[in-house]
Image: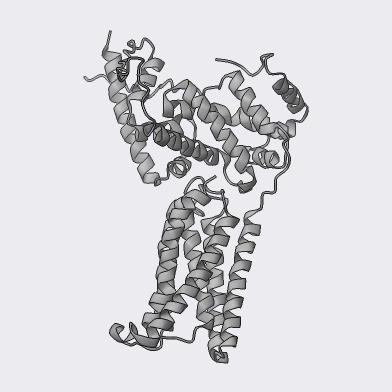
Amino acid sequence: MTSYSGTLWPALEVARLTLERSPSLAESTSERLMESYVDGEVDAFELLYRRVSPNLMGYLLRLTRNRERAEDLLQITFSKIHRARGSYLRGAPVLPWILAIARRSFLDERRSANVRTEDLSPDGSLPEQQNEERPLPTELSDALEMALDRLPDNYREAIVLTKITGLSVAEAAQVLGATETAVKLRVHRGYNQLRKELEQYSRTP
Amino acid sequence: MTTPKHDPLADFPWPKPEVPREEVSAAIHSACTKNLCPVKSMSAATRLTLCLLLSSFVAGVGYWFGIRHHRSELGLRTGVYGALGWAIVQAAVLFIGFSPARGRGTLGSRTLRLVLAVALPVLFLGYLTYSAWSYVPFAEFSHGARADHAWSCGLVALTFGALVSGGVMLAWRGTDPLTPRLSGALAGLVGGVGGALAVGIGCPSHEAWHLWLSHGLIVLALGAMGCVVGRRLLAP
């Protein structure tokens, strides 16, 4: 995992030093940072990005289950945010707004991938499906990651949003376009499934 | 004696948020901050005011139309009072339906907005039924001058309604990635009510079928159209 303090990114270093000199911005809410970004403050974008991108990346990673696709979608999401920043309603909760944009980007990308034609191998035949055998997990955290991967999409999304991204049930319901009751039900069923999977893991020697 | 069942979820090592690679972050940073300048982001109050002004303009056209066609003073006055009453309802629907407090508490919640999307056309159809002074059987209504008048009235109401709905959607364009279809339906319904009221000021007919079909049906049609268009216009 990389950190932000590396030397590869001098512009961010400058921004970080500037932010250290202006603590008021650093203590602002995400909504206030978004408003400052809309007003053209580069530092505000930097802080907002630092605050939001880990959650967003974690969410996209669990949606796509592929780091490269998740990073592509992260870039697409931020370019959409940049273009749509003028339409941001001042005072509206930022994280659900951004997560909903990310989710729509993911759904659009998946839809276009479904109609994409398959590349043929050099001899003209269809490539064979490769079954990736994943090794058995040795740590509980790995077992949890694998169990999360095996959950149905709607259960996994509800759990990721509420448990990992830290949204409230109401905010998760907004992002998913579902009712709060539906989100609670998905989280509950997802928990039950995760519990079963992890009980199996704890029984294995 | 039974041992307590171990719950593996109790001390779950939930995955930590993921930090994107530096190259990715640098690319995003560069794309989003290059020549960054302030953009005009209208407040919800400004957008609301613009929508109400457009609605008032359309009502004004309806009033002018009524004067040109020598509608009685009492009829015009009643129409204007009705329009004023509904302007308050429209403002409330726009405020709740498009409020920035979406996702926080009851105000702006999805359920409340769904209730509004159902209640608004039902209330408006109830108002039209209450306003109807005369009733002719449908067979009689569907022929001759009455039918012609209903067609022309419906088309004008549809045009006015589409104008107001389009204005509402443009004013709130790209503001709702969360529930764009629902917001689109609300925009269509509010616009439809605005258009139907504008026509109602200038239209002398008080027949039940005329009001239901030429004025009321437009609201439902624009609500459905808004639901479709909202997905494209209201999501960023």
Q: Nearer the viewer, residue A47 or B221?
A: B221
A52 vs B115: above or below: above
* Residue sitting at the far right: A21
Image coordinates for residue B130, horizontal then vertical, percent: 41, 81
The residue lying at 60 percent from left, 56 percent from top is: B171
* Image position of A171 (left or right of A19): left
Looking at the rendered structure, the number of numbered marks drawn on it comes to 0
B172 vs B37: above or below: below
The residue lying at 38 percent from left, 75 percent from top is: B213
Image coordinates for residue B53, horizontal then vertical, percent: 63, 67
Task: Give the image quarter of residue A132.
Answer: top left
Asked whether the viewer can see residue A82, the reply is: yes
Quadrant of the frame with the N terminus of chain B: top left
The residue lying at 38 percent from left, 82 percent from top is: B147
Task: Give the image quarter of residue B66.
Answer: bottom right
* Residue sitting at the far top: A205
Task: Give the image quarter of residue A106.
Answer: top left
* Image position of A187 (left or right of B159): left
Image coordinates for residue B29, horizontal then vertical, percent: 65, 28
Asked whether the viewer can see residue B127, the reply is: no
Q: Nearer the viewer, residue A66 or B114?
A: A66
Image coordinates for residue B132, horizontal then vertical, percent: 41, 84
Quadrant of the frame with the C terminus of chain B: top right
Q: Nearer the viewer, residue B140 or A166?
A: B140
